[in-house]
């Protein structure tokens, strides 16, 4: 087993982890702000991938798909919050979870009706195909691109949350929504935007992962389980936790794929079980 | 619930339905069994009736945890599947007699429920649903990988039970009516056990935890252990449902372990009504009949079922049976 192979596998782990970070961040932001676990997150990831494919084939350019689809699905997410999730605030915390679960059925079946049940190949844009020699080995350009996009998005998100007025309102609203209302902030508008943002992040993950795995209606199921594992390991509601746990899970999965391929699908769950035994609230979570 | 000592005096206008309600509650198991005896003659096919029986048991067992302990598990397909797989492997690969295979399946599924419950009851609130889902997916992928035992993606086959020996008589198990009434005995047993659990002090303890965890803990209940016991019992009943489905289909599909199967159990329970004893059974009946009818029209029946479920969460959270009970027997 030479070091070059290990390095390459390590890097695909980082690329896989970058996608996990996006989906887990979306899940975590929505939970941290609204207290809702979005069970349709995987389905919206899948819808995002299809939307990217659709826009790309309409315009003939991957870049339009990458830009337009997350905004489109993010707006769709806001519609979901406004019409379906909003009536459930104040009821049991299980109710939004159950509703979004039912919604994921509708989304998956809807995509099957429109695009068919079989997987569709998502071509890598021609400017990003091929590999680049970084001195220590050849790395696929597309994966480097994915990692770059995720780094930029995470930086923008961090700047937005820490340095802007809106970010201040979001952070304060996660602590105490009632106090924000007293201060004259229309918190329901903030919730609407945050839900849209979280869904947009999931669908961006969907578009980005399209060229790495084929696009099919069932792809969301695994993504949802992965996002849950990452947020449970990192601590739900903790953004730093989602980022670190996402990268760790990505690297662990691809390293296991190298050394013990039959364990690759199992290892992340084992990791989660281990974290639960040692720190049930997650690595960066606070005790309830 | 049956104890009249705590019944407050009521105005005469409402006394009659109240007495009816207490009668129904007291005799809920015999009444359920009567309904089950009639069921195969009311449904379009006997195979559908057996399916209702299987998922009725699963949903009633699941509701012990969801409706009565207040824990929303998204991983119960693991126990249904474990029961089915263990029964199938025991019969097909080890030649174990069917009744011993059923016992093994129930016991094995219960053991798995204990293990997953021990991990997931360590978490609180919304985490619980996510952790049960993830751990059940772990079971799914293990079954996928261990294909020499489980048949992997193709599912488990090759353990058809043709006839069974009951009290010295050979019963043809391929005959759907015989099959239904044999499996109905298991279902009746499961209903009776769940009813006994709910009437016991333990049943009161889990409801206390559902209503207010901190108060139950202050009253001296060991909340974590009570949750774990409820989880294990609920998983064991679900495993019984799984062994019944293995005997019924002579086939265990891999998808029976997927979290969509867990979600289906949740849907059935909620459609029928999680707040009542028989609601989940009604939910299983309604869900499976819907599936039967809609899948004749379109292969995309899940979009209809999903939409109906969303509408139920929004507008009818008590479910069909729960709403009916609340209307009729106020």
Image (cartoon, coloured by chain):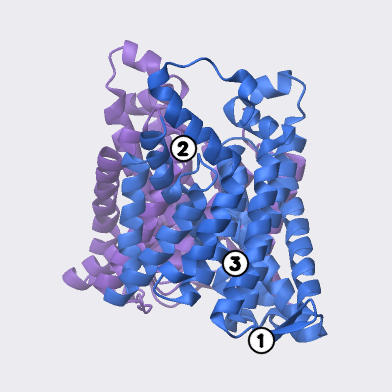
Callouts 1 and 2 close, C-beta under 8 Å: no
Which mark is on residue B160? 1
What color was chain A assigned in the picture?
A: purple
Which residue is denoted by mark 2 in the rendering?
A: A31
State which quarter of the image contains the N terminus of chain B.
top right
Q: Which chain is blue?
A: B
Which mark is on residue B257? 3
Residue lying at 65% horizontally and 45% vertically, measured from the top left: B195
Q: Nearer the viewer, mark 3 or mark 2?
A: 3
Say if residue A39 shows up in the picture: no
- Residue B95: which quarter of the image? bottom right
Chain bearing tag 1 is B
From the top left corner, tell me how far across and down residue A268 is, in percent: 65, 59
Element at label 3? helix
Q: In this rendering, is residue B329 above or below B29?
A: above
Marks 1/2: CA distance?
47 Å
Residue lying at 82% horizontally and 80% vertically, measured from the top left: B96
Chain bearing tag 2 is A
Element at label 1? loop
């Amino acid at each position: 087993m030479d070091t070059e192979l290990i390095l390459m596998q390590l890097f695909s782990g980082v690329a896989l982890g970058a996608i996990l970070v996006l989906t887990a961040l979306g899940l975590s932001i929505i939970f941290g702000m609204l207290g809702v676990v979005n069970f349709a997150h995987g389905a919206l990831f899948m819808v995002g991938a299809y939307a990217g494919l659709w826009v790309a084939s309409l315009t003939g350019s991957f870049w339009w798909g990458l830009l337009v689809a997350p905004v489109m699905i993010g707006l769709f997410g806001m519609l979901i919050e406004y019409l379906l999730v909003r009536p459930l605030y104040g009821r049991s915390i299980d109710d939004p979870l159950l509703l979004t679960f039912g919604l994921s059925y509708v989304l998956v079946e809807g995509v099957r009706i429109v695009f068919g049940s079989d997987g569709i190949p998502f071509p890598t844009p021609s400017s990003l195909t091929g590999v680049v020699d970084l001195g220590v080995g050849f790395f696929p350009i597309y994966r480097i691109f994915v990692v770059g996009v995720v780094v930029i998005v995470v930086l923008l998100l961090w700047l937005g949350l820490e340095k802007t007025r809106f970010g201040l309102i979001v952070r304060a609203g996660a602590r105490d929504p009632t106090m924000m209302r007293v201060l004259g902030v229309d918190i329901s508008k903030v919730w609407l935007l945050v839900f849209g943002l979280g869904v947009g992040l999931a669908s961006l993950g969907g578009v980005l992962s399209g060229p790495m795995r084929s696009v099919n209606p069932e792809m969301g199921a695994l993504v949802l389980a992965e996002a849950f594992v990452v947020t449970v390991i990192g601590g739900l509601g903790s953004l730093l936790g989602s980022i670190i746990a996402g990268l760790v899970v990505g690297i662990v999965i691809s390293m296991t794929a190298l050394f013990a391929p039959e364990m690759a699908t199992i290892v992340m769950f084992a990791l989660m079980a281990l974290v639960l035994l040692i720190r049930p609230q997650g690595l960066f979570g606070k005790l309830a | 619930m049956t104890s009249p000592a705590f019944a407050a005096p009521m105005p005469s206008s409402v006394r009659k339905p109240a007495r009816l309600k207490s009668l129904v509650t007291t005799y809920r198991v015999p009444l359920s069994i009567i309904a089950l005896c009639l069921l195969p003659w009311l449904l379009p096919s006997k195979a559908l009736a057996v399916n209702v029986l299987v998922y009725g048991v699963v949903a009633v067992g699941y509701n012990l945890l969801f409706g009565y302990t207040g824990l929303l598990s998204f991983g119960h397909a693991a126990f249904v599947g474990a029961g089915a797989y263990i029964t199938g492997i025991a019969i097909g690969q080890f030649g174990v007699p069917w009744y011993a295979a059923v016992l093994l399946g129930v016991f094995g599924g219960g053991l798995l429920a204990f293990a997953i419950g021990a991990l997931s009851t360590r978490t609180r609130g919304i985490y619980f649903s996510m952790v049960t889902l993830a751990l059940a997916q772990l079971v799914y992928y293990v079954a996928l990988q261990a294909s020499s035992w489980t048949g992997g993606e193709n599912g488990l086959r090759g353990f058809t039970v043709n006839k069974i020996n009951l009290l010295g008589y050979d019963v043809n198990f391929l005959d759907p009516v015989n099959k239904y009434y044999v499996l109905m005995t298991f279902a009746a047993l499961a209903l009776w056990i769940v009813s006994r659990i709910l009437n016991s002090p333990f049943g009161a303890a889990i409801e206390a935890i559902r209503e207010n965890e901190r108060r139950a803990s202050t009253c001296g209940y060991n909340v974590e252990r009570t949750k774990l016991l409820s989880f294990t019992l609920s998983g064991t009943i679900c495993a019984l449902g799984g062994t019944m489905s293995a005997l019924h289909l002579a086939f265990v599909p891999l998808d029976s372990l997927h979290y969509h199967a867990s979600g289906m159990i949740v849907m059935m329970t909620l459609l029928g009504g999680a707040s009542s004893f028989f609601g989940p059974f009604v939910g299983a009946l309604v869900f499976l009949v819907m599936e039967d009818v809609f899948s004749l029209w379109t292969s995309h029946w899940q979009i209809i079922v999903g939409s109906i479920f969303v509408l139920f969460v929004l507008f009818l959270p008590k479910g069909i049976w729960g709403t009916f009970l609340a209307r009729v027997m106020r």
